[in-house]
Amino acid sequence: MDRTPIRIVFEDEHLIVIEKREGLLSVGTSCGRGEITAHRLLNNYLQNTCGGGGRGFGGHGFSGHGFGGRGREFGHGREFGRGRGTKTAQNVPVTDLEWRSGTKTAQNVPGMRSRGYGAVPRAFIVHRLDRETSGLMVFAKSEEVKLRMQENWDSMVTHRGYVAVVNGLPGGSGNGSGRPGRMATKGDNGSGRPGGDGKQGGDGEQMQGTVRSWLKENSAFIVYSSPRDNGGQLAITHYKVLESSNKRRKSLIELELETGRKNQIRVHMQELGCPIYGDRKYFGENPAQLAESKKARRLYLHAHILGFIHPVTGREMKFTTGIPRAFREEV
């Protein structure tokens, strides 16, 4: 399988939305100078396409758009922007994490012809994903757009959705039910465990709930949670169980962030006693869960939905990648 680190799913003259792979840093750190990051790859891409080189990711071993295969719709089929340098839901299909080999350049992808810029083109960081997390991110193409999005993030972002595979079942017996900050509804009958010996999910009643707590980072860079205001940041995570397996003792869940704090989902799933599969940092107090997570090939957390108000046009935009196949195979 092609291990292309990033793929561009949308671009106009103001923004660029990408899907990054797990294992890739969003932006460089002081101790990791020279390391390949999503930010660095985008700068290379913009300078080689918009700066006149016209090579895109060609020559760097990275795939630009990865078009082809089964397409997924962006923004309910609405056209995103008109005019030069934009792409639409109709001509930007995205495969369900089936990353294809080969390269795409500004010359052979519709709507990506080289454009002249007065200054050296750059990507500006708007937000980040953890290195271990895959999924959708948005970058700005100017300092002005970056600041506009960052300063109005809470009002401009309409949807941040994730999918994850967790150990156990949120709210299930022995999985941390009754912990501070937890609220479960629908399908939580006390034990919270799915019926039968197989899987729970589909059209049946689904367990869902909300975790609300205050998060604070200690000197060891570990984020911990408190049910009461401890001077940290308020964090709110909504979750819904899509599917669960008694045999494998795992669940596929969908999460929506009301706030976006560092390691928020990972800490809140640990709070519920159902750490994310593959998480070796936030795995709770159960040695068996850590042993299970060590078997995982990756951290099973993926940012699959990103919605926001365009900072220049004012249009509502929504992007989705679908659920990675590997996630379903684990449940």
Image (cartoon, helix red, strand yellow):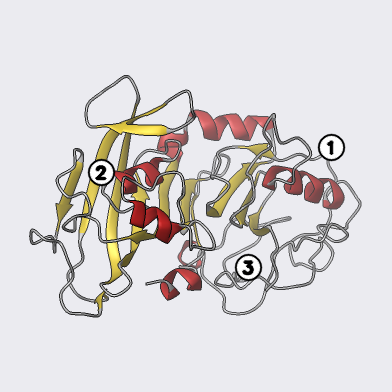
Front disc: 2 or 1: 2
Q: Is residue 149 visible?
A: yes
The residue under label 3 is 92
Q: In which quarter of the image is residue 245?
A: bottom left
The residue under label 2 is 211
Which sits in the foreground, 186 or 147?
186
For the residue labelled by badge 2, is the local secondary structure a helix, a strand or a loop?
A: strand
Q: Quadrant of residue 264?
A: top left
In what quadrant of the picture does the C terminus appear?
Answer: bottom left
Q: Earlier in the sequence, mark 2 or mark 1?
A: 1
Verify CB contact (< 8 Å) between mark 2 and mark 3: no
- Identify the residue at horizontal 28%, vertical 43% (top origin): 271
Which sits in the foreground, 40 or 329?
329
Q: Is residue 255 visible?
A: no
- Identify the residue at horizontal 45%, vertical 44% (top origin): 281
Q: Quadrant of residue 285?
A: top left
- Alpha carbon of mark 2 to alpha carbon of mark 1: how far? 44 Å
The single residue placed furthest to the left in the displayed view is: 190
For the residue labelled by badge 1, is the local secondary structure a helix, a strand or a loop?
A: loop
- Alpha carbon of mark 3 to alpha carbon of mark 1: how far? 26 Å
- Identify the residue at horizontal 49%, vertical 28% (top origin): 220
Above or below — where is 264 with respect to 206? above
Q: In the rendered structure, which amino acid carries the disc numbered 1?
A: Val
Task: State left or right for residue 209 relative to residue 221.
Answer: left
Q: Which of marks 3 and 1 is nearer the N terminus?
A: 3
Task: State left or right for residue 169 relative to residue 283.
Answer: left
The residue under label 1 is 120
- The x and y percentages for residue 244 are 28, 70
For the residue labelled by badge 3, is the local secondary structure a helix, a strand or a loop?
A: loop
Front disc: 2 or 3: 2
Q: In the rendered structure, which amino acid carries the disc numbered 2?
A: Val
